[in-house]
Amino acid sequence: MRIRSLGVIDDAVVELSPGFTAVTGETGAGKTMVVTSLGLLLGGRADPALVRIGAKSAVVEGRIALRPGATAAIRAEEAGAELDEGALLVSRTVSAEGRSRAFLGGRSVPVGVLAELADELVAVHGQTDQQGLLRPARQREALDRYAGDAVAGPLAKYAEAYRRLRAVAGELEELTTRARERAQEADLLRFGLDEIAAVEPLAGEDTELAAEAGRLGHAEALASAAALAHAALAGNPEDPESVDATTLVAGAHRALDAVRSHDPALAALAERIGEVGILLGDVAGELAGYADDLDADPLRLAAVEERRAALTALTRKYGEDIEAVLAWAQQSAARLTELDGDDDRIGELTAERDGLRGELSVLAQELTDARTEAAARFADAVTAELASLAMPHARVSFAVRQVADPEGVEVDGRTVACGPTGADEVELLLAPHPGAPARPIAKGASGGELSRVMLAVEVVFAGTDPVPTYLFDEVDAGVGGRAAVEIGRRLAKLAKSAQVVVVTHLPQVAAFADRQLLVEKTNDGTVTRSGVTVLEGEDRVRELSRMLAGQEDSETARAHAEELLATARAEG
């Protein structure tokens, strides 16, 4: 990896061994930046606070060797990346403003693509993971992960059935607890629908009746106006001396028609006057028919007003107009059908709930059986690891138990509480020596014992993870002496089958590394290109001496450092 402008690191290259690499240095020298850099390459959150003060951006570049046909290689090529002689070039840039860019095999990709590849490439184990594993929920997740498909299969089915049961139970509770409210709602809907059905309104009827009422209420005025207009257009037969518009227009047309052959313009005007005459005749005829058809029946007017009053009563309650009233009736009829069918629905939901509980009982039993079996294997594997970590008499076990609940599911002949992940409560227990009671690891282990237990757990996980690289970030904290030597020996053994990177303060661990990297600052507080160095020969002895005694030139510390290196080489 090459790291630029990240935290205290100005510009440095980190060369990791294919086997076991130990990263050491003074506290605050920037060792953690190695972990942070790897996290950025694997799609971790881009924090602008990581950018070195005064720099525009931080850049991390890495070259990752991939096995032929590896899932990560296939996914990278799908994203458009090109492999360089079987290796994948990855780059991540974080600007001081918080923007982040990712490159994979020379191609710009979303950061999420890097995160997808992370699970296939590197397993990171640190002190945060240790603290998380102290929580029973995380311990259950760890056990499920270790169990693999034996738990994953039934757990997926269980989760789906549990989700459906929650939905069914919620709907059933709503239906049963709101029975009175639903009955009241149904009565109101029935009353409204009966009231509308009694009137039998028609779409647009209110508008038509309003127009008819207007005509009937002003029939005399309308008839008088129509008669006067007809007389003005067609003349009054009772007054032969009256002059009407039709006669006048006809006279004008005859006058022009007599001379139209002498001037085309005048002929055009004669045509237009003729059209006016025809139009006046049509209008006069319609006025005569309107007056004859006009109904002035007071009984009809009373019937119209009565009908309008009935429609108005509906629009006051159910809508602005009859169209809105009819729409309300349609919606209410559908809702009433739904409410009337609730009793049947309650029966259906009750049967489905009981069926789902039976299904959950079967699946919960499968999960309990699978977890119990995996717990025994997991505990034996961790116990074996503890024997290699200077805790030969310690025993690790898992408590897989349930809590009684009359409303739960049946497991092992008992009705117990269940949740989204099953009915089991899982807790990791430790008996540090023979005769000691098994207690939760958070209460039953000292600081050094806890670190070793957590490391043993991580190593067991490493055996089940199909990833080529494991990063341990100071998981050996709180350990020293013989136990530290055993941790170094165990990590070296793990490195024979995978790449292992360890950030450590322990010389006993660092001595077992195939390569030791020293991170150190310059006088101005930065880590430059020369600030991450591969230690060999005398330089490595000096660093181990410093880690042992705080004194690089102490003869006793040097002798001890050389002894550690010799022991590690002999076992390698």
Image (cartoon, rainbow, N blue to C red):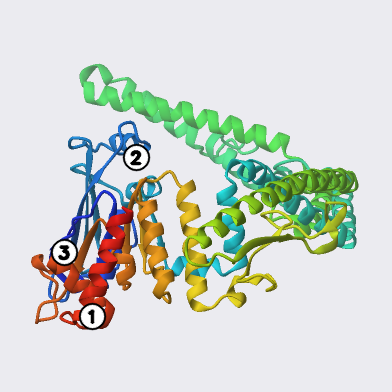
Residue under label 3, please give it. Answer: 535
Q: Relative to 468, is 96 on the left or the right?
A: left
- Amino acid carrying mark 1 in the image: Thr
Residue under label 2, please give it. Answer: 72
Q: Is residue 499 visible?
A: yes
Q: Say which of 557 and 403 sits in front.
A: 557
Kindly report the distance in space between the C-alpha atoms of the residues bearing marks 1 and 3: 20 Å
Q: Which of the two labelled residues, at mark 1 and mark 2, occupies the earlier sequence position? A: 2
Q: Using the image, tell me which numbered label, if any, was put on residue 138.
A: none
Which label sits in the foreground, 3 or 2?
Answer: 3
Kindly report the distance in space between the C-alpha atoms of the residues bearing marks 3 and 2: 32 Å
**Viewport quadrant of the N terminus:** bottom left
Residue at the (77%, 50%) spot, across then down: 168
Residue 125 x %, y %: 41, 61
- Amino acid carrying mark 2 in the image: Ala
- Amino acid carrying mark 3 in the image: Leu
Residue under label 1, please give it. Answer: 556
Which label sits in the foreground, 1 or 2?
Answer: 1
- Residue 408 figure quarter: bottom right
Residue at the (25%, 70%) spot, across then down: 31
Q: Relative to 437, is 513 on the left or the right?
A: left
Please determine whether, in this image, residue 563 is positioned above or below residue 295. below
Q: Say which of 49 and 391 sits in front.
A: 391
Kindly report the distance in space between the C-alpha atoms of the residues bearing marks 1 and 2: 48 Å
- Residue 516 figure quarter: bottom left
